[in-house]
Image: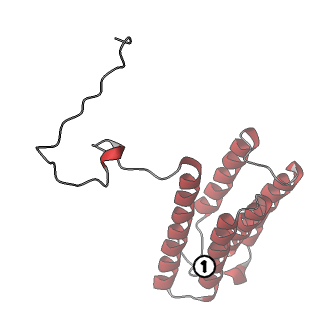
Amino acid sequence: MMAERGNGVDAPFFVAGSLLAGALSGLWLWRNPSWLLAPRNHYLYLVGGTAAGIILSALIPFLHGAGPWLVLGAGLVVYGYFERFRLLMTAGGALAFTGLLAMVIHADVWGGALHLLTTGVLAFAANKLYELRHGRRRESLDSPPDFIGSFEEFDEEEPVQFLTLPRGRR
């Protein structure tokens, strides 16, 4: 991910992969819209602006290759604004901030740490989105739910009650 000119320099295959992943995600979202709270044209402008921003910002030398990083973060913030979803806006802001730090800091070790931090933020956001859609995974219970919390000792002299059907329903 880091080569030649500085910390945030993205290899050309990363830019191409971002554009391909963005195109496939855009196609999938177009066929399976989430809430689409904003007008549909706004999403098309966002996709076009993000793609153009990734390509053009990769060519600007004073950004030290961190331009696509900043554009992806800004695109995620705008998408979160369209969907009225603060989690996406926060993740996009963190992504843009780490891209800005990668642009300013020129030590290779910090660049790698910022890449790992960005990956962790995006993985955390993806996990939260999964939990919001599907709920948290629950442990399976080996005992019936009414048993939980009743840990009294068994009294042998207490009469045992069996479930019986009412008369006439056998």
Query: Left or right: where does residue 36 sit relative to residue 167?
Result: right
> Quadrant location of the C terminus?
top left
Quadrant of the image occupied by residue 84: bottom right
Colour convention of the picture: secondary structure
Q: Nearer the viewer, residue 27 or 12?
A: 27
Quadrant of the image occupied by residue 160: top left
| Helix, strand or loop at mark 1 | helix
Q: Position of residue 169 (x, y in %)?
A: 38, 12
Query: Left or right: where does residue 91 sit relative to residue 151?
Result: right
Quadrant of the image occupied by residue 47: bottom right
Determine crowd level at label 1: few under 14, some 14-19, many 20+ residues with C-alpha closer than 10 A.
Answer: many
Q: Position of residue 145 (x, y in %)?
A: 36, 45
Residue at image position (63%, 88%) is: 104
Q: Nearer the viewer, residue 121 or 27?
A: 121
Q: Position of residue 109 (x, y in %)?
A: 45, 83
Q: Indicate the amino acid at tag 1.
A: Thr
Residue at image position (43%, 50%) is: 137
Asked if one can make out residue 2 in the rendered structure from this viewpoint, the answer is no
Q: Position of residue 14 (x, y in %)?
A: 59, 61
Q: Which residue is mark 1?
A: 98
As displayed, is residue 132 above or below residue 141?
below
Residue at image position (28%, 53%) is: 150
Query: Left or right: where does residue 155 sit relative to residue 142?
Result: left
Residue at image position (36%, 19%) is: 166
As displayed, is residue 140 above or below residue 90?
above
